Image (spheres, helix red, strand yellow):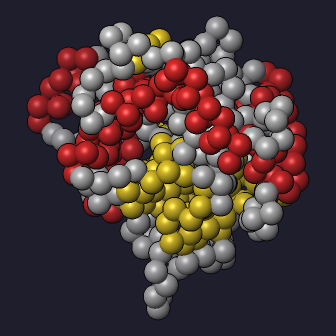
Amino acid sequence: MSDWLEPPEPDEVEVTLFGPGKGECVLIHVGEAEWIVVDSCIDDTGRSAPLNYLGSLGVGVEQIRLIVASHWHDDHVGGLAGLVDSATAARLVCSAALEPDEFLHLVSAADLRPMVKATSGVHEFRRVLDCLSEREVYPVYASADRVLYRRPISIGSSHCEVISLSPSDASSHDALQGLRKLLEQQDATQRTVVPRPRRNPAAVVLWISVGIVHVLLGSDLEVDSNPAKGWTAVLDAISRPTERASVFKVAHHGSVNGHDPRVWTDMLEADPYCVLTPYLSGATPIPRPTDMDRLVSLSPNIWITRRPGTPSVRRDSRVDRMAKEVTRWIRASEPQNAGVVRLRRRSDGTDDWRVHSSGSAARLA
């Protein structure tokens, strides 16, 4: 069997990042055959990237403990409702600082009356809510300094803790104020068009500890002019972890508006292993060349799932249809085009991170 298809050992931490060019998903093995999924995307086979990958390892969805929607932008929630529907043992986590259109979907979920015209990401939120409602369970709302998961300590198993570092109280307060203003102008007979904010101070940043290994997932959190929001609020928090992470999922596709120098000096080890996805659907793809220069000046260990300018090559749709008819999972030796970066290390820190990149993924230099 290819090394790519070997599941991690019980004492190994794995961080795997998928990024097909528009879309992002992080899979984390936190030891003891337990997994966390952060965000969701579709790979170039048209399937759920995390489910496809876990299936190729022979890992069942019942081993997923948490599914975290860091925020409801289209490029972070592709296929999320299907993932939530499949992983019935997992708890869903999302930001406590919901945007107004997300709030309205939450409010209207009970009577199924659409109140708002929104993006595909927010409609995915509605489908997720419907799925949870059928199971009579509720989402967990992440906020600063909240423990989302802690594995019970037992003989032979490593310590595991997952903590959300954002959104801040100020971000949650502003979200509620935005909902109040929207409800004041809500017309019960029409669906409201809600503009999405240009900045993203409310995405869920995660701190994950397994044994003595620490991982920081930056989501799309941005620097905000208000020091009580965004990265400044995370960095100034009294409860911020004092350890340093050896892996960093770079925030907001490496863009300068997601960069705070203190993250690198105060929260990360020297020369950390960093992974990021690009965003190639906008008028100006990110990261820009200046962003990539900045990143490689901060660490020699930077991997991106697809460089801007890399062409996308899809399989013939007829081949995909035939494959779907005969098998649930395509057990390829490695993904052929969807950029994937995988890091593995033992939770006791006795080895260094081993990096495996495939498809369009590459090391920045």
Residue 152 vs residue 363, the one in the foreground: 152
Q: Residue 253: give x, y in percent of width and height.
A: 66, 31
Image check: 308 left or right of 20?
A: right
Q: Residue 151: give x, y in percent of width and height.
A: 47, 75
Image check: 100 left or right of 297?
A: left
Q: Is residue 352 above or below residue 10?
A: above
Q: Residue 19: give x, y in percent of width and height.
A: 52, 33
Say if residue 321 shows up in the picture: yes
Q: Which residue: 28% across, 46% down?
A: 132
Q: Which residue: 47% across, 91% down?
A: 155
Residue 257 vs residue 111, the one in the foreground: 111
Q: Which residue: 88% across, 53% down?
A: 265
Quadrant of the rendering where the N terminus is positioned: bottom left
Q: Which residue: 55% across, 29% down?
A: 180
Q: Residue 4: give x, y in percent of width and height.
A: 43, 51
Q: Residue furthest bottom?
A: 155
